[in-house]
Image: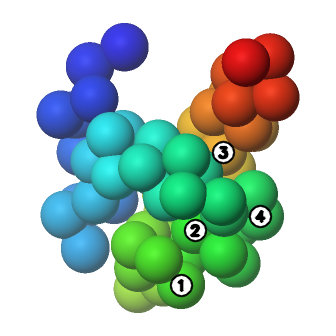
Amino acid sequence: MNLDKIVCYCMSVTNGMIKEAVDAGASTLEEVQAATGAGTVCGSCVDDVKRLIDQFVSERNQK
């Protein structure tokens, strides 16, 4: 996965920023939104952000 790829264009949030938020303890959309701002402007990226959260939380739990 390209961690530099932008997921939320409104807030310039990348895959890596979502991963960092999850690694720091965020596990819900609301927690990631509070940490990164992703999905808080137009909302078009919310489904992608949720998918990334699920993936990163799953990876975190496997460690």
Residue 32, label in figure = 2
Q: Which amino acid does label 2 sit on?
A: Val
Residue 58 in view? no
* Residue 58 shown left or right of residue 38 in the figure: right
Mark 3 and mark 2 in contact? Answer it, CB < 8 Å: yes
Mark 1 and mark 2 in contact? Answer it, CB < 8 Å: yes
Mark 2 and mark 4 in contact? Answer it, CB < 8 Å: yes
Q: Residues within 10 Å of mark 2 (few under 14, many from 20)?
A: many
Q: Residue at left 42%, top 49%?
A: 20
Q: Residue at left 37%, top 14%?
A: 1
Distance CA(mark 1)–CA(mark 4): 10 Å
Q: Can you give x and y, in whole percent of width and height, for residue 38 in the image?
A: 43, 69
Give the image quarter of residue 59. top right
Distance CA(mark 3)–CA(mark 2): 8 Å
Q: Which amino acid does label 1 sit on?
A: Ala
Residue 34, label in figure = 1
Q: Mark 4 points at which residue?
A: 28
First along the sequence among labels 3 and 4:
4
Q: Name the residue under label 3.
A: 53
**At numbered mark 4, what does the secondary structure look like: helix, strand or loop?**
loop
* Residue 51 shown left or right of residue 42 in the figure: right
Mark 3 and mark 4 in contact? Answer it, CB < 8 Å: yes
First along the sequence among labels 3 and 2:
2
Q: Residue at left 25%, top 73%?
A: 10
